[in-house]
Image (cartoon, rainbow, N blue to C red):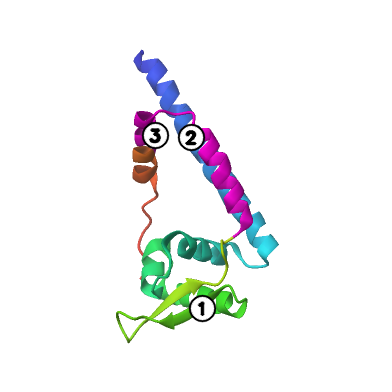
Amino acid sequence: MTSRQRQLLLDEIVRSTRLMVAGSVLANHRMAEMLEINATDLQVLNTIDLFGALTPRDLSQKTGLSTPGVTVALDRLERARRVERIPNPVDRRSVLVRSLVKSAHPAYQTVEKTMRGTLSRYSTGELGIILDFLVKAIPVEPKAK
């Protein structure tokens, strides 16, 4: 592969990744509208769905939202009966937030099924490379204060 071909391939990977992110953001907004919550709250709910019960501080660290921002989102989600705060068995001074819904949204199940179908075409070695890229490509945002 020539250096020009490599550069074109890199450019297309970057372009495709940007398109995937844009599509994900827009789909997130549509899902949030269907659930009658805002997009940030949906991602807080999605984070709980992915990691299980978390402390508000853990949610802040995983989402990049400020601790007060997480508190506001949790208040809204609690009023909407999507999450509940429960005593933290490890630290009596804190709470855990757990989801009251089976999945943040059924559309995530469709996305996962589609992704698994697409990924099934790759070898185990190729899947390792894809995972390595995805883990390293997760955006590193400034931490909330």
Please name the amino acid that badge 2 sits on. Answer: Leu
Please name the amino acid that badge 3 sits on. Answer: Leu
Left or right for 108, reference 93: right
Residue 85 drawn at (x, y percent): 47, 80
Kindly identify the residue that appears in the image at 30 percent across and 79 percent down: 90
Kindly identify the residue that appears in the image at 62 percent across and 56 percent down: 106
Residue 145 drawn at (x, y percent): 35, 71
Q: How far separated are the C-alphas under marks 2 and 1?
A: 35 Å
Q: Which mark is residue 119?
A: 2
Please name the amino acid that badge 1 sits on. Answer: Glu
Q: Are marks 3 and 2 in contact (CB under 8 Å)?
A: yes
55 vs 41, nearest the viewer: 55
Residue 58 drawn at (x, y percent): 36, 69
Q: Which mark is residue 127?
A: 3
| Label 3 element class | helix
Closer to the chain start, of discs 1 and 3, is: 1
Q: How far separated are the C-alphas under marks 3 and 2?
A: 7 Å
Q: Which mark is residue 84?
A: 1
Residue range of the region highlighted in magenta in the rendering: 105-130
